[in-house]
Image: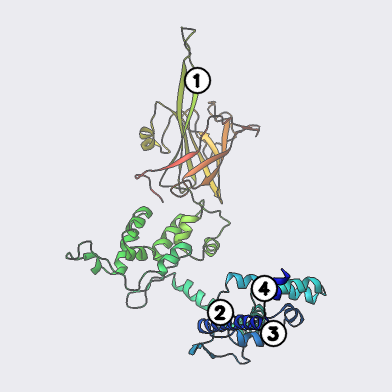
Amino acid sequence: MQSTISSISPEEETNELKRFRQEWLAELRSRKAAASAGASGTSTIRNDAEEVNSPHQSSSKAAAEAPGIPGALPHVIGPSSQVIAGSYTPSIYLAATSLPQKLGSALNVYRRAVEREQSGDLDDALLLYRQAFRMDPHVDQVYHREEALASIEAAQQNTLQKSTASAVHDSIKELTAKVQTSLSVKSRAGASAVRVTSQVLASILAGFPGDLSFEPENEEEPVHLQMVPEELLIMFLRKLDTTSIERFASVCRKARVIALDSVIWRELVGATYIPPQITRDEDLTSVLERYLYDYRRVYIEHPRVRLDGVYIATCHYVRPGLSENSWVTINHLITYHRYLRFYPSGQVLSLLANEEFTPQQVIPLLKPTLRMKGFYIGTWSITDTTIQITNLLDASGRYPLPTDNLPTSSVNNSDGSEANRYTFVMTLDLVSRPLGRWNKLNILAYNSVHLGTGDVNPVALKNERPFWFSRVRSYSVY
């Protein structure tokens, strides 16, 4: 080995080192040329000592060297520009754009480092500063820019707060004017009718164009409805029920807008929400204020008892039967129905009928003049979603109904005949399930009250089921 090393002459060793240096320099030049051609500036490599000793003083240097970060924030807010890679582009503040995920993570680490440094924990601050600069070398500049923009935004907010009072006052005046004008229909010669909407429907109407019209399915055919004025269409809709109005509104976008006119729904709300639909102590104005005077929303969402039909509960139970064969067990499935019909005057009819009478037979007969077993007449009231039925008296004809001259607490009539001894009280919960509005009644309590002693006893509800609403065309709503 020693003979081999000594055989190399000094001249050959010098030539070898020169060749190595030349190759190394050539490689450095090629890398430098590629880097300058692919980027608009030269990146600066900083060691850990520079990052730790002066993390807050390197923002100006990094701004000058970083190709993708704009320059320092100007003292005067206004449009500015910068030249990047030979082209003129306007500068964009970082606060106006979303930061990349990696840069955002580095910014969060840098903020933690600043907090640690301010609290005196220099060791943890040093580690966090190093971590932030490894994630992004320009994180200090982004931090200073974010802080500057935050202070500017705070100053602008203080300026805007001075004019907030007057702006709110103007908006209240505008809202008051809209509410007042929504109570009357404007003519076509004036402005269009005010239609108050809210929530999802308002967002849908916002996407409708301004010039709506009835379009024919066949372009060659005329649309005669297009020649009818909107005021006349509104008068037609005021004569229809709510189901027909919503069916018309589902035809097209113009029909939907016309069907939202406040006059149509204001008349429905005014005719529906009167005692006992609302308590006598409750004012309709307070109800409208809760729904921002959106009459259609009041009619749909505010609890009300349906008067255009009957609530029916279908109940079943199994009764054991008799069998001559001990090996055969006979069970009978018994079906019966409970009916509740409400009147706008506060009167309610209750009927318990077995399977001999089908709903198709009972519904046309369900009137105050009906006399059959299981028929009761009482009064009802509603508070929020709770319906209270009181004074349910037997009206089957077995006992005479009380009159003004005969109190309900009487056990015997003046002629010696027996009178009603018990009255019934029922408490129901009104809900909307699953299609339709206010179409289900859950029984919460059912009690009997002795008229002589006032004793209250609960009635067993082992086989009872909820009441479901069924619309009847022959029933009047008002």
- Identified by mark 2, the residue type is Ala
Report the Cα–Cα distance between label 4 and label 2.
25 Å
Q: Which mark is residue 283?
A: none
Residue 439 in sight here: yes
Is the residue 343 above or below the residue 461 in the image?
below
Whether tag 3 and tag 2 are in contact, CB under 8 A, the answer is: no
Determine the CA span between mark 3 and mark 4. Answer: 15 Å
User: Mark 2 — residue?
Assistant: 96
Q: Which mark is residue 134?
A: 4
| CB within 8 Å, label 1 to label 4 | no
N-terminal-most mark, 1 or 4: 4
Front residue of this view, candidates 78 and 429: 78
Q: Which residue is mark 1?
A: 319
Instruction: Say which label, 3 or 2, has the lower sequence index.
Output: 3
Q: CA distance from mark 3 to mark 2?
A: 23 Å
Kindly report the distance in space between the C-alpha atoms of the residues bearing marks 1 and 4. 82 Å
Question: What kind of element bears circle 1?
Answer: strand
